[in-house]
Image (cartoon, rainbow, N blue to C red):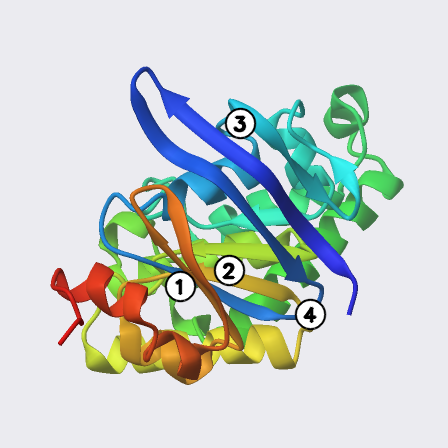
Amino acid sequence: MSTIVSFKDVSLNFGGVKALNNVSFDIKEGSLHAIIGPNGAGKTSIFNCISGIYKPTSGHVEFKGENIGSLRPDEIANKGVARTFQNIELFENMTVLDNILIGAHRHIDYGSISGILFGPSVREKEIEARKIAEDIIDFLEIEEYRFSYILSLPYGIQKRVELARALAMKPEIILLDEPAAGMNNEETEDIARFILDIHEELKITTVLVDHDMNMVMDIAEDVIVMDFGQKLFDGIPKDAIHDKQVIEAYLGVSTDK
């Protein structure tokens, strides 16, 4: 498998605080990767560097071999990078369908004048965007909420809608920032199933950050463990749970006898 995202000696500083300290790793195309670690370990900072919200202090981030460190978030999104957020970032006074269409409109390239005139080519593109949105609504099993306003929806469904909007962009890689946060066991099982379906059926490279170790260990193919901005481990999940540094980071105690 070829490398789709490469972190090369990336550091990210906020004044005297080192959010990331000389971090390097590769994410292979088609993989299901997890990034785990205690609070403040630097997990979301990695996502922010990939998606262009933060610019690395040193080192660089590559997407499909291209250095994207100087690109704006919208430019990186247009290259095929989609993400969800730790805190839900939806338009609360819009419907589920309209929120998902925002993602689908990445594929619409007509200008404002064409939009006002609303000619045949524009109508064709709008129909295409609606089809993308409807396919994802079916895929994530949210048909009954299609015309519901975000404000009226349960938390777990809102998280699913945010995932739907990201999928509507038809990304090459999707970054999921704590997709199961705040969910009960049933909702967590549902979102884990959808993540596996995204990886296996849609063939989208998937990277998730989450604190639910059971879910991560069940579905991830590879795992990176972070602590205080440094990479502690990079490998398969079954090796991570026996790694001395990983155990110390999560338990806060030494494993020395």
Q: Which mark is residue 174?
A: none
Q: Spatial distance from mark 2 to mark 1, Cα to Cα?
A: 6 Å
Is the C-beta separation of discs 2 and 1 under 8 Å? yes
Task: Looking at the picture, tell me which residue is in the foreground, 61 or 212.
Answer: 61
State the image coordinates of residue 144 (x, y, percent, origin top left).
40, 72
Crowd rating for badge 2 (residues with CA inside 10 Å; few <14, some 14–19, many 20+): many
Q: Nearer the viewer, mark 3 or mark 4?
A: 3
Residue at figure coordinates x 71%, y 44% from the top left: 63
Q: Which residue is mark 3?
A: 56
Q: Which residue is mark 1?
A: 160
Disc 3 residue type (three-letter): Pro
In the rendered image, which quarter is residue 73 located in?
top right
Could you tell me if residue 154 is visible in this image? no
* Mark 2 / mark 4, whichever is N-terminal: 4
Q: Spatial distance from mark 2 to mark 3, Cα to Cα?
A: 29 Å
Task: Looking at the picture, tell me which residue is in the foreground, 131 or 30.
Answer: 30
Q: Spatial distance from mark 3 to mark 4, Cα to Cα?
A: 25 Å
Describe residue 32's horizontal placement relative to residue 69 as left or right: left
Q: Which residue is mark 4?
A: 30
* Mark 4 / mark 1, whichever is N-terminal: 4
Q: Nearer the viewer, mark 2 or mark 4?
A: 4
Task: Looking at the picture, tell me which residue is in the foreground, 227 or 54.
Answer: 227
State the image coordinates of residue 247 (x, y, percent, origin top left).
24, 69
Element type at mark 4: loop
Q: Which residue is mark 2?
A: 164
